[in-house]
């Protein structure tokens, strides 16, 4: 007999698990049509890879974590005087490579160009499309993945991503410090602590 799920159980699941649907045999025009139907709403993120379409509704925990990470990165850049232009979940796509994706957050270092320099992705639940493979052919220089409590840095060298111990675009950022502050009691507390530590370093 299947377990009984209470309304409270369902609410917890909804907050903590990304909802994902993957469709196969989808051509580029159908992908574009889905984007048009979805419009500007950020409720569903859409990714496309060679005929496979993923629709993902991020959980509350996913969104909280990616926002905390983004706020810390942006505060770090402000404290160090780095030029960083946030572009949010900008839809990146290239028909000739049959790829499209909407990062959790993305940034340009300096003026915004056709492709961002840096994308942030929170891998909260298993499954789904290989985001690195999508970003690779889109030409995004660097991707940071939060996965299983760690921040992984992937740098595009030639035609493939290589795992790196730190960012090449923003080597001044101490990712271990950023990671440690993701567990702060609130986003504001995390940012305050980051600024305090950086100012202590002087």
Image (cartoon, rainbow, N blue to C red):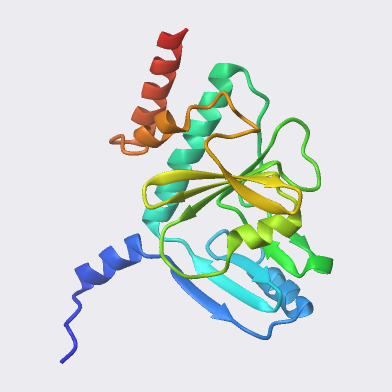
Q: Residue furthest right?
A: 96
Residue at 55% x, 65% y: name it. 44
Lateral position of residue 125 relative to residue 44, left or right: left
Q: Position of residue 34 (x, y in %)?
A: 68, 74
Query: Percent position (x, y) of residue 117?
Result: 70, 41
**What x and y, as percent, mark residue 42?**
57, 58
The foreground one among 188 and 96 is: 96
Most distant residue in the top direction:
202
Q: Is the N terminus in the top left, top right, bottom left or bottom right quadrant?
A: bottom left
Would you say residue 41 is visible in this rendering? no
Relative vertical location of residue 12 with respect to residue 77 in this rendering, above or below: below
The front one of 130 and 75 is 130
Quadrant location of residue 118? top right
Furthest toward the bottom, the residue is 1
Q: Residue at x 62, y 17 (%)?
A: 81
Residue 36 visible here? yes
Query: At 63% from the left edge and 33% from the top edge, which residue is drawn?
Result: 168
Identify the residue at horizontal 41%, vertical 45% (top origin).
150
Residue 188 appears in which quarter of the rendering?
A: top left
- For the image shown, how many numbered marks are present on the structure? 0
Residue 111 lies, with reference to residue 2, above or below; the image says above
Query: Above or below — where is 18 with respect to 170?
Result: below
Where residue 94 sits in the image (x, y, percent)? 79, 62
Horizontal side of residue 134 vs 66, given as left or right: right
> Where 19 falls versus 76 (above or below)?
below
Q: Is residue 73 left or right of residue 17?
A: right
Q: Nearer the viewer, residue 54 or 161?
A: 161
């Amino acid at each position: 007999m299947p377990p009984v799920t209470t309304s409270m159980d369902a609410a917890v699941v909804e907050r903590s698990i990304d909802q994902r649907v993957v469709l196969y045999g989808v051509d580029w025009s159908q992908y574009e049509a889905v984007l048009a139907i979805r419009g500007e709403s950020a409720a569903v993120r859409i990714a496309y890879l060679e005929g496979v379409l993923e629709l993902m509704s991020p959980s509350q925990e996913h969104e909280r974590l990616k926002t905390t990470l983004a706020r810390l990165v942006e505060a770090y850049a402000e404290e160090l005087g780095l030029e960083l232009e946030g572009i949010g979940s900008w839809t990146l796509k290239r028909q000739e490579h049959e790829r499209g994706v909407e990062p959790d957050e993305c940034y340009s270092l300096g003026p915004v160009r056709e492709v961002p320099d840096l994308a942030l992705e929170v891998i909260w639940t298993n499954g789904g499309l290989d985001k690195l493979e999508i970003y690779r052919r889109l030409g995004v220089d660097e991707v940071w993945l939060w996965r299983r409590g760690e921040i992984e840095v992937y740098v595009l060298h030639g035609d493939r991503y290589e795992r790196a111990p730190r960012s090449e675009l923003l080597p001044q950022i101490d990712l271990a410090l950023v990671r440690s502050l993701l567990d702060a009691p609130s986003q504001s507390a995390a940012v305050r602590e980051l600024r305090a530590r950086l100012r202590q370093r002087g």
